[in-house]
């Protein structure tokens, strides 16, 4: 399990809030509009440098990074990015939400799970490793937030499942995700490979046959409907001959 506390700095400058035009103006100036809140203080609309934000988001600890927030060169406090938005087409950063952090108060965060090792079921049984859960929610002090949690999967074989309860725990971390939640297991594709051609063959045989039956049914119905009135005169003729 790796832990990291990065001391990046994010400089924020107060801005006018409440209108889309103001947000557009901020973006035209090369900045990103955002909101700072938390720690029992009033929320504040700010403008920040997108390069600083992206450096934080792309760091090892990502959005869980604790950094120093400076407000207009004055107030300095610990903070973290709790929400951000990208422009869907060009991928530009549009907006961020920053929360002031008290280093002595626990936070709830989600951290990624990294699978380590080679599963025995993959190495000797020909199975495929499937990761079901990629993040786990924990509660801890800001300084103890891990960049990720390592999970050893070398013992996994067919029939065994790695669960949240199997992840490395410590006194500093409180796991909030259901301990029975599956994280990873080894699956077999052998049966699927054998069954797939049979299913495909059955479907291939059934697909063209079904329309024929339907068509025949419709034709027989139509023919019966058309010939039914003609049968009576034919029988009548035979009766007359007799």
Image (cartoon, rainbow, N blue to C red):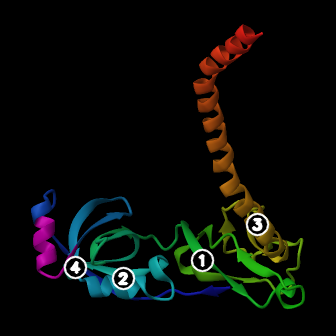
Q: Earlier in the sequence, mark 4 or mark 2?
A: 2
Does residue 187 appear in the picture of this structure? no
Q: Which mark is residue 31?
A: none
Q: CA distance from mark 4 to mark 3?
A: 73 Å
Q: Which residue is labeled 1 in the image?
A: 112
Secondary structure of residue under mark 4:
loop
Q: Nearer the viewer, mark 3 or mark 2?
A: 3
Q: Nearer the viewer, mark 3 or mark 1?
A: 3
Secondary structure of residue under mark 2:
strand
Q: CA distance from mark 4 to mark 1?
A: 34 Å
Measured as percent of width and height from the top left, residue 65 is found at 46, 81
Q: Which residue is labeled 4 in the image?
A: 74
Indicate left or right for 171 with 18 as reference.
right
Identified at 35% across, 70% down, the residue is 84
> In the rendered image, which quarter is residue 101 located in?
bottom left
Measured as percent of width and height from the top left, residue 218 is found at 61, 36
The quadrant the C terminus occupies is top right
Q: Nearer the viewer, mark 4 or mark 2?
A: 2
Q: Earlier in the sequence, mark 3 or mark 2?
A: 2
Q: CA distance from mark 3 to mark 2?
A: 63 Å
Q: Which residue is labeled 3 in the image?
A: 201
């Amino acid at each position: 399990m790796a832990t990291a506390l990065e001391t990046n700095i994010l400089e924020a400058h107060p801005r006018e809030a409440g209108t889309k035009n103001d947000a557009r103006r901020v973006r035209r100036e090369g900045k990103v509009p955002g909101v700072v809140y938390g720690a029992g203080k009033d929320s504040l609309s700010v403008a920040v440098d997108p390069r600083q934000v992206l450096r934080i988001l792309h760091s090892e600890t990502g959005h869980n990074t604790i950094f120093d927030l400076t407000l207009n060169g004055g107030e300095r406090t610990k903070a973290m990015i709790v929400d951000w938005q990208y422009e869907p087409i060009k991928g530009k950063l549009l907006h961020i939400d920053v929360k002031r952090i008290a280093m002595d108060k626990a936070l709830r965060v989600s951290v990624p799970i990294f699978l380590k090792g080679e599963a025995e079921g993959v190495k000797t049984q020909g199975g495929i490793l499937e990761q079901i859960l990629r993040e786990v929610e924990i509660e801890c002090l800001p300084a103890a937030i891990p960049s990720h949690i390592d999970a050893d999967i070398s013992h996994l074989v067919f029939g065994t499942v790695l669960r949240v309860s199997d992840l490395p725990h410590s006194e500093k971390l409180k796991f909030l995700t259901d301990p029975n939640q599956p994280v990873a297991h080894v699956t077999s594709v052998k049966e699927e490979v054998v069954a797939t051609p049979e299913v495909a063959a059955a479907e291939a045989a059934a697909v063209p046959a079904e329309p024929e039956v339907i068509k025949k049914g419709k034709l027989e119905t139509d023919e019966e409907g058309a010939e039914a009135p003609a049968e009576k005169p034919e029988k009548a003729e035979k009766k007359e001959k007799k």
